[in-house]
Image (cartoon, coloured by chain):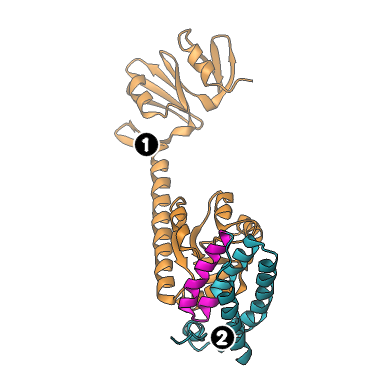
Amino acid sequence: MNCLIIDDESAARAIVNQLCKNEGSLNVLEQFSNAIGAIKYLNQNEVDLIFLDIHMPDFTGFDLIQTLKNPPRVILTTSDSKLAIDAFEYDCIVDYLVKPINLPRFKKAVDKARKFTVENNQETKETAESKEEAQQLYINIDRRLIKIEIPSINLVEAKGDYILIKTKEKNYTVHSTLKKIEEKLPNDLFLKVHRSYVINLKRIIDIEDNSVLIGKDVIPVSRSNRPELMKRLNLL
Amino acid sequence: MTTEQPNLNYIKELSGGDIEFEEKMISILRKELPEEILVYKKAIKNEDFKESAEIVHKIKHKISILGLEKSYEFAVSHEKELLEEQKEGNDKFIELLTRMSNFLDKL
């Protein structure tokens, strides 16, 4: 894990650096005697873990955490055991080490940070995968299931017992109803503007009277659906 | 009752035989402690309790680095009393700082 040491005391920095060496799996990228220098570094570099002193002049360790949009994992190092309660307010803080720090306790804290990082990576991966799945729709055409990327759909038109799905690349005629596909499409992106049309709001080129232009298609907007359409537009 | 004596046990435990680290730590303590003692004395003289508590907070870590466990507890209470604008522990704290300085001078 790549880490930073932030502490206004040089003795404390030297000790944490030595503990990192002894631990074996930590790579100390930089050491900072104040929070300001560290913030600049953190805005330009990726760091897995920070060993952070709370009690620093002008800008405390807690101030630093609040300044960062996505703080990495933090292990607090401090002489104040009474500040531990405040540490629970921050999700990024994985442990709290009271000086003088010994190696067994240090290793335990690093193990916690490592576990947090692995769990976080797993969570991020799962969220990305489920988001990707939600962006796709499978349609049945001639007994084949064809995948369509939902954001690529321009509009869907009802045609009797069928629906016509128009995407940026291709059109598909599927045996289904407008109501069924409407349930599968995200509400924030798609809107029914007419009893026969569901449109992708992001694909609107212009709106004139009671019609919208999507690609080359002019789609009618029924009087009852027009207020909702106007509400969903970012009007100047 | 014997007075607690400064030692290098903690530094040696961390160093695991790394002489460079041991020398670095001793050099930091030798350089910074006299400066911090001056700041402390000046703050006490001026009755600047906030400043004196802050410097005791800094020195506190050095007390623990030199293995002075009981003295560390005393420093915690002295820092607290300074924040309450009391300085009864001042003489005892000065004596502790002198003990630490003498130890570092002899290394």
| Disc 1: CA contacts within 10 A as few (<14), some (14-19) or many (>=20) | few
Q: Amino acid at mark 2?
A: Glu
Residue beneath the point at 45% across and 87% down: B2
Disc marking residue B22: 2
- Callout 2: SS: helix
Residue at image location 47% in from the left, 53% down from the top: A86
In reply to whether residue A105 is colored magenta, the answer given is no
Q: Colour of chain A?
A: orange
Q: Quadrant of residue B44?
A: bottom right
Residue name at image x 42 percent, y 29 percent = A186
The label number, if any, that marks residue A175 in the structure image: none
Judging depth in this view, the residue of A162 and A191 nearest the camera is A191
Mark 1 — residue?
A: A146
Main SS type for the magenta part? helix
Of A105 and B93, which appears nearest the observer?
B93
Task: Compute the Cα span from label 2 to label 1.
Answer: 68 Å
Using residue A48 as the reference point, say whether residue A59 is left or right of it. Answer: right
Compared to residue A59, the image places residue A193 above or below, namely above
Q: Give the residues drawn in magenta, as a range.
A: B63-84
State the image quarter where residue A110 is shown.
bottom left
Left or right position of A207 against B48: left
